[in-house]
Image (cartoon, helix red, strand yellow):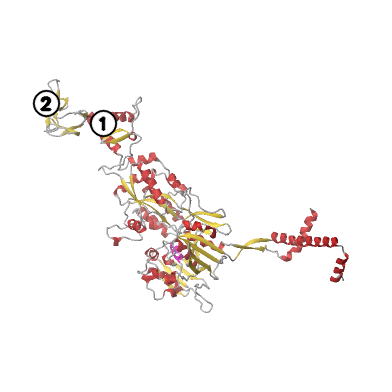
Amino acid sequence: MFGMKSLIRLLRLMTRWERWLLLALCTIFVLSFLGLLRVFYVENTVLAPASGGTYIEGSVGELQPLNPWFIVQNDVNRDLVSLIFSGLLRYDPLSKKIVDDLATLETSSDSRVFTLHLKDNIFWQDSTPKKPHPVTADDVLFTFQTVQDPQFPNVILQQNFRGVKIEKLDDRTVRFTLDEPYSFFPSNLTLGLLPKSSFEGVPVSRLSLTTDFGYKPVGAGPYKLKNLTQTELSTEVTLERFQRTLPPPYRIDRIVFRIFSDYSSLLSDLRNLQGVRLVPRNEKGDPIIPRNFTAREYTLPQYVALFFNLDRKSLQDEKLRLGLQLGTDKKALCDSVYQPVLVDTPLLELDSTAWQYHFDPGAAQGALFASNWNLPEKMRLQQLLEQHDANKLGYLHAPPVASIGTGSVLTLTGSLKDVPLGSHVNGIAITQDATASGAWKVILPMDTGTGALHFGTNRLRLTDPKGKVIDSAYVFRAQTLIDYNRAMEEQRLLRLFLATRNELQSTIQDVTVANLFLENGKLRLRRSDDPLPIRTNAAGQQLVLHLLTSPSPVEYPKIAMYIQEAWSHLGVKVVVDIPKSRDEFQARLLKRDYDVLLFGQSLLDNLDSFPYWHSSGVQKVTGDANDLRQDAYNLSQYRSSRADALLETIRRTSDETERETALGALRSIIKGDVPAIFLYSPLYTFAHHNDILGIELGSLSLHSDRFLTLDRWYVQQNRQFVAGKSWWSFFPWLGGFLHGQNAH
């Protein structure tokens, strides 16, 4: 047998060059073999997500105690709570449906009874092998019945469970019974469960102050709190994967949230982040992200609108509201704040292409013309037209303008065929004119005495012998030459307007209301530097609207100033009110202390518009602060029995066809009533490093919903053989490979 000794003997007999050649051939063989192994491995395996790794995300905000009961106004907390806690149900952004989470759901046919069965082997995060802590029906009752307690601090959350009967059927089953059908109720059951044992002895009224639990939370979610540290730049919260049997499995071991006080601090540390929540934008509206990051834009079921306070008398004029809507260039407005997703209705589940808003300045002026508010030029012109008709028609004729000094008189004449002797003008008897047969005359004095003409516009009344007024005329008495010239110019423009209106003007310029300007009570031609007029009503009150908005987000003050400028061209003076503090803004919001409100509303995952447009959401403004409701979300104070009935149907029905029909009818009613001008749905950007894979956002209802698909995310990969392949498949593959090479 050829052994090691024989090989050594052979090598000794070989020359040095022969040994080098043999070594080279062996090296080529080994490298070729390894290369074939690699080709085989690559061709017969695929990259697959692997468990492990860390995801680090930066956000701007303030960390507060982590408790599902108290996260309404804090999006940073929502992110953390969504991972630490789980609810009975959860929203699935991919299917856009409410699905099972810690429990399975059974719903009665009338949408009144909801029965939840807890899944097996569900434990709280403080559970240990020696001391297991399972999630039970008692924890479910504690979570929701606590919310129903009159002393519960969160009134906004409390309203979701008013009138709901909660019963424990057994250790793993709970039933919720409603007084009336409510098809959207499952959305309320996405609230994160809390362990009853963690709050033993804590009064309900002080639950919001339980910071011990808030900074060492215990939930049943896929991740648990590992540590919380404060650095020079940020607050750092580290979560680690909680080992639970509940599907789906999560791959990323650790999630680190770095919470900065402002975006400048965040951007200065961007190299140490793998994700950025709510990416800021530059002056051009582009998201500020590095090249190795991917930006994902999304919208939430939200809209920003200009809400008309329909309790204000001026805004009860439907034509005025319509004119303001038609005269608002939403496209230009939204472009100015880089918000491209325009909306035309608050019913976001509907296809808005069925009714697209169109900016129409001409139609806007037409609607405003038909309103109770008119430009002063139009009102003055209308007055002149009435006076012109009065002077032209009837028995009494007078010059429209007279320059009569002190001590002078105005003589008027007429026919005795029409006006008998014994008649009077302004209380002065007419006399027969000796210079003209069949004519009468009357002499009106200046300044004092019966029938005297004062400076300004005078109404002359012709009365018959019985004292009945049979005709009227108007004379403007000028006090100065300047007044006289202005009045004569006004009469000239009146004649041009009449000629233009009657299409008689051909050689001289046309004159319309738009060409006129009111100055010192008289019309003249408008100049380019003339200020824009403000509309007034019949009582002479100017149309001044107070627009309230908040200082954040930064788009709101910009939009408010845009509206102020745009509506000034419609003859509306807008006073922009931006309170300095959030508390002051909220106080004015609650009191409905505004004519127009620039604000946003969120429909969440159920897209329920009921709280915002049903009359039950109208604020009761009595002057007593105790009467104000925190849950009065009807910001327009909109009342419509037809809309109420449809909103109730939409909430009640589980029939999709009936719901769609009601939504369509409701859209038409809101469109016609114009309780608000709907502007846009805010566009947000979430950015992540290109190494973070598997991200699929879907249709989010909250910013934190991006973590509802976290089970799909991964940062590590490994190769796995495809079905039917293994290392034992190498030699058959090699035979085929060599055969293919030879054939080639």
Q: Earlier in the sequence, mark 1 or mark 2?
A: 2
Determine whether label 1 and label 2 are within 8 Å by CB. Answer: no
- Tell me if 197 is positioned left or right of 6 in this view: left
Outermost residue toward the right?
13
* Residue designated by label 1: 486
**Circle 2 is placed at which residue position?**
431
Q: Is residue 653 visible?
A: yes
Q: Amino acid at mark 1?
A: Arg
In the image, residue 122 above or below residue 381: below
- Residue 513 horizontal/vertical position (percent): 32, 35
Magenta segment range?
A: 183-191
Q: Is residue 552 left or right of residue 457?
A: right
- Looking at the picture, tell me which residue is in the foreground, 438 or 228: 228
**Where does the N terminus fall, quadrant-wise?**
bottom right
Residue 478 appears at what percent x and percent y?
A: 21, 31
- Circle 1 packing at 10 Å, graded few (<14), some (14-19), many (20+), is some
Residue flagged by tag 2: what amino acid is it? Answer: Thr
Residue 462, quarter of the rendered image = top left
Secondary structure of the residue carrying tag 2 is strand
